[in-house]
Image (cartoon, coloured by chain):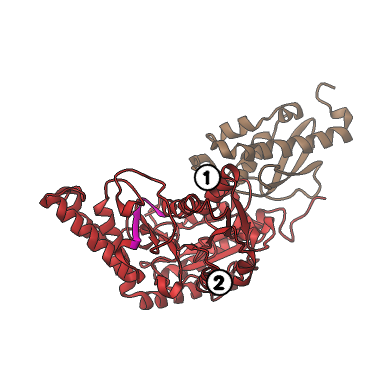
C-alpha cells in the first residue's frame, strides 16, 4: 500500500521482484536445521552438499549445461565482473581487446572502463540502431587477432530490446573468441539453453525471477579461459571462493524451475498486458514515443519517452497515485547525463530525459494496466503544461 | 530516486505560481549547466517590490518544487531582498534537498537573479539603494 492507503501497482519488475513464497519455503531449512558447511565431511555437511549439487543440476538442466559449468556468485554484477575480469586475466598472453556495445549495464561498462583505464585493454563498442539492436556483422568486423572476449547483453534493461546473441555467438565462435552475455534481464522469460544460444559465458541474477537478492550465477562453458577474481578455499570449481550459500543456491534453483515450468503460458499472458499498456499509453498520452524494438522485446517491458518533461517527475506523479515505476533519466539515477542507452539509440538528450519504464510481472492484472493507462495522461499533461519547452507555452527567446 | 522531504513532495504535487505573465516587467530563461533543467520566470514589479511571480519549469521533482517555493518566497519582497535570495534559503524552506539536487534550488535562485538583473539594467532608477 502507498502512503495514502490506495492500492499499490508494482510495475518495476525489471528492477526486482518479490520472492515467491514457494522459494522461501524451499530455502528455510538451510538456515536453521540443515546449516552444515557444504565442504564438511560429516553428515550435516554432506546434506548441504547434496542440496547444493541438486540446485546446480536443476539449473544446469534448464540451461542445457553440465552442473560443473554452473558457478554460483553473489549477484548478477559479480557474475559480469568475474566473466570480464576473469577472461581478461586468463587471456593476457593472447591479447588485450574486448568488444561490447554502448547499451550494457554498468556492471559491464564500468568493469571494462577499469580494464581500459588501468590495465591497458582496448574496448570496441559496436553501435546499436534506433531500436537498440546490434548488427552481428559489425561484431564480426570488429574482431581482431587480439580480441579475447565479446560481451553483449541478451536483453536490455531499460528498453527491453532483445539482441541477436545466437547469431553473434556463431560469429565469435567461428573466429575462436569467447562470447559472454549478460542475461540478467532475460532470465525468467527468454530461452537460456546455452547450446541453442552458443554462448560461452552467461550471467544471471535470481531476484529478477522471483528468487532472492544476493545470489547470481555465471555459466562457464568447459574449456573457456577464466581466472577466479575471488580466491581462497577452491569452492565453485575453483572459480569463486567462499563458503557456499546453500539456502540461496536452493532459492535460485527453485525460482528458475518455477519460471521455466510455465514459461510460454506466462510470457503470452504478460506480453498481452504489455501490448495493451503500450497501445493504451501511445493512444492516450500526448507526445509519447515507444523506445526499443516493437516486437523484438522482453514480454514484460513497456518503455517510453515523453517530450518536454523529465522522467523523475513522472515517477513522483505516479508514486503519488500508488504506482511504482522506473526511469533511466539522469535526475532519477543521480547522474547529470541522460540515459546512455537512449542516447546510443540516437534519441536526442532532451527527449531522453523524459523516459519511463513500466515492467510487468506475475501479479499484474488487466485492471492494473487500465488504471495506469487512465492516470498517466493526466500526470504527463500536467508536467507538459508546466514545461517551457512544450508547444503552446509562451516561449522566451 | 532521491528521497524528498514532505514539503518538496507537497510543492511538487501542488506547485504555486505556475504560468506566464504576458505583461511581465521582468523575465528570464535559465538552463542548469549541471543537468539541462530549464526554468522561465516572470515578475511583476512595482514600487521597488515584486508584486507577482510565475514560472514554467522543465525538470525533476526538486526543480519544480524549488521553482514553486522560490517564486512564493519572493512575492512581496523588495528587489534587494530578492537579489539576496540564495539556493540554500530555497532548499531550507523546502525542508532540505538531497546533496545531488542542490543545483535544482540554484536554478530557481539564478533564474530570479537573472530576471532582476535584466530589470535593473533597463530601470537604473530601480537600483536598490537609489
Residue A196 visible in rendering: yes
What chain is tagged by disc 2?
A: A
Which chain is displayed in brown in the rendered image?
B
Q: Is residue A326 magenta?
A: no
Which chain is displayed in red in the rendered image?
A
x and y percent of residue B18 in the render?
66, 49
For residue A171, the mark is: 2
Disc 2 to disc 1: CB gap under 8 Å: no
Determine whether, in the image, residue A381 is placed left or right of residue A34. Answer: right
Q: If the image is split into quadrants, where does the C terminus of chain B sit?
A: top right
Q: Residue at x 22, y 56 (%)?
A: A27
Position of residue B50 relative to residue A108, above or below, is above
Between the residue at mark 2 and the residue at mark 1, the CA separation in whole angstroms equals 55 Å
Determine whether, in the image, residue B4 is placed left or right of residue B52. Answer: left
Q: Which residue is mark 1?
A: B10
x and y percent of residue A29 in the render?
17, 54
Residue A14 occupies which quadrant of the picture?
bottom left
Q: Is residue A74 magenta?
A: yes
In this rendering, which labeled residue sits more in front, label 2 or label 1? 2
x and y percent of residue A2 in the render?
40, 53
Determine whether, in the image, residue A155 is placed left or right of residue A350. Answer: left
For residue B101, the mark is: none
Q: Residue at x 62, y 40 (%)?
A: B66
Residue A126 occupies which quadrant of the picture?
bottom right
Q: Nearer the viewer, residue A370 or B60?
A: B60
Q: Residues within 10 Å of mark 2 (few under 14, many from 20)?
A: many
Position of residue B98 relative to residue A8, above or below, is above
Residue B12 visible in rendering: no
Q: Residue at x 81, y 34 (%)?
A: B117
> Magenta residues, as a range?
A69-76
Amino acid at each position: 500500500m502507498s502512503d495514502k492507503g490506495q492500492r499499490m501497482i508494482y510495475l518495476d519488475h525489471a528492477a526486482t521482484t518479490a520472492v515467491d513464497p514457494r522459494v522461501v519455503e524451499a530455502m528455510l531449512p538451510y538456515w536453521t536445521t540443515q546449516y552444515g558447511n557444504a565442504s564438511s565431511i560429516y553428515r550435516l555437511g554432506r546434506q548441504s552438499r547434496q542440496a547444493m549439487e541438486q540446485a546446480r543440476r536443476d539449473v544446469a538442466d534448464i540451461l542445457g549445461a553440465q552442473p560443473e559449468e554452473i558457478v554460483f556468485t553473489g549477484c548478477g554484477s559479480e557474475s559480469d565482473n568475474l566473466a570480464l575480469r576473469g577472461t581478461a586475466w586468463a587471456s593476457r598472453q593472447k591479447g588485450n581487446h574486448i568488444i561490447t556495445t554502448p547499451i550494457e549495464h554498468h556492471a559491464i561498462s564500468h568493469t571494462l572502463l577499469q580494464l581500459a583505464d588501468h590495465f591497458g585493454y582496448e574496448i570496441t563498442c559496436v553501435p546499436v540502431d534506433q531500436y537498440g539492436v546490434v548488427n552481428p556483422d559489425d561484431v564480426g568486423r570488429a574482431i581482431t587477432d587480439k580480441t579475447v572476449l565479446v560481451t553483449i547483453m541478451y536483453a536490455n534493461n531499460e528498453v527491453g530490446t532483445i539482441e541477436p546473441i545466437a547469431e553473434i555467438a556463431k560469429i565469435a565462435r567461428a573466429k575462436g573468441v569467447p562470447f559472454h552475455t549478460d542475461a540478467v534481464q532475460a532470465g525468467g522469460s527468454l530461452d537460456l539453453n546455452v547450446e541453442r544460444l552458443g554462448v560461452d559465458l552467461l550471467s544471471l541474477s535470481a531476484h529478477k525471477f522471483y528468487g532472492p537478492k544476493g545470489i547470481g550465477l555465471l555459466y562457464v562453458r568447459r574449456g573457456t579461459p577464466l581466472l577466479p577474481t575471488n580466491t581462497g578455499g577452491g569452492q565453485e570449481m575453483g572459480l569463486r571462493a567462499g563458503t557456499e550459500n546453500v539456502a540461496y543456491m536452493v532459492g535460485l534453483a527453485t525460482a528458475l524451475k518455477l519460471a521455466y515450468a510455465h514459461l510460454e503460458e506466462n510470457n503470452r499472458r504478460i506480453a498481452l498486458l504489455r501490448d495493451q499498456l503500450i497501445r493504451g499509453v501511445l493512444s492516450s498520452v500526448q507526445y509519447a514515443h515507444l523506445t526499443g524494438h516493437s516486437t523484438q522485446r522482453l514480454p514484460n517491458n513497456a518503455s517510453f519517452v515523453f517530450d518536454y518533461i523529465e522522467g523523475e517527475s513522472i515517477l513522483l506523479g505516479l508514486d503519488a497515485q500508488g504506482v511504482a515505476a522506473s526511469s533511466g533519466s539522469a535526475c532519477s539515477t543521480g547522474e547529470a547525463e541522460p540515459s546512455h542507452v537512449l542516447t546510443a539509440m540516437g534519441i536526442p538528450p532532451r527527449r531522453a530525459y523524459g523516459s519511463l519504464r513500466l515492467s510487468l510481472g506475475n501479479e499484474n492484472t488487466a485492471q492494473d494496466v487500465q488504471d495506469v493507462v487512465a492516470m498517466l495522461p493526466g500526470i504527463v499533461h500536467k508536467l507538459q503544461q508546466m514545461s517551457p519547452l512544450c508547444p503552446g507555452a509562451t516561449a522566451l527567446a | 530516486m532521491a528521497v524528498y522531504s514532505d514539503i518538496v513532495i507537497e510543492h511538487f504535487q501542488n506547485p504555486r505560481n505556475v504560468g506566464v505573465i504576458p505583461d511581465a516587467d521582468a523575465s528570464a530563461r535559465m538552463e542548469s549547466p549541471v543537468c539541462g533543467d530549464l526554468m522561465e520566470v516572470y515578475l511583476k514589479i512595482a514600487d521597488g517590490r515584486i508584486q507577482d511571480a510565475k514560472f514554467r519549469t522543465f525538470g525533476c521533482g526538486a526543480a519544480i518544487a524549488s521553482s514553486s517555493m522560490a517564486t512564493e518566497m519572493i512575492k512581496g519582497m523588495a528587489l534587494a531582498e530578492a537579489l539576496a535570495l540564495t539556493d540554500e534559503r530555497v532548499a531550507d524552506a523546502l525542508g532540505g534537498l538531497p546533496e545531488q539536487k542542490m543545483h535544482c534550488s540554484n536554478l530557481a535562485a539564478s533564474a530570479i537573479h537573472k530576471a532582476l538583473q535584466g530589470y535593473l539594467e533597463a530601470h537604473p532608477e530601480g537600483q536598490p539603494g537609489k
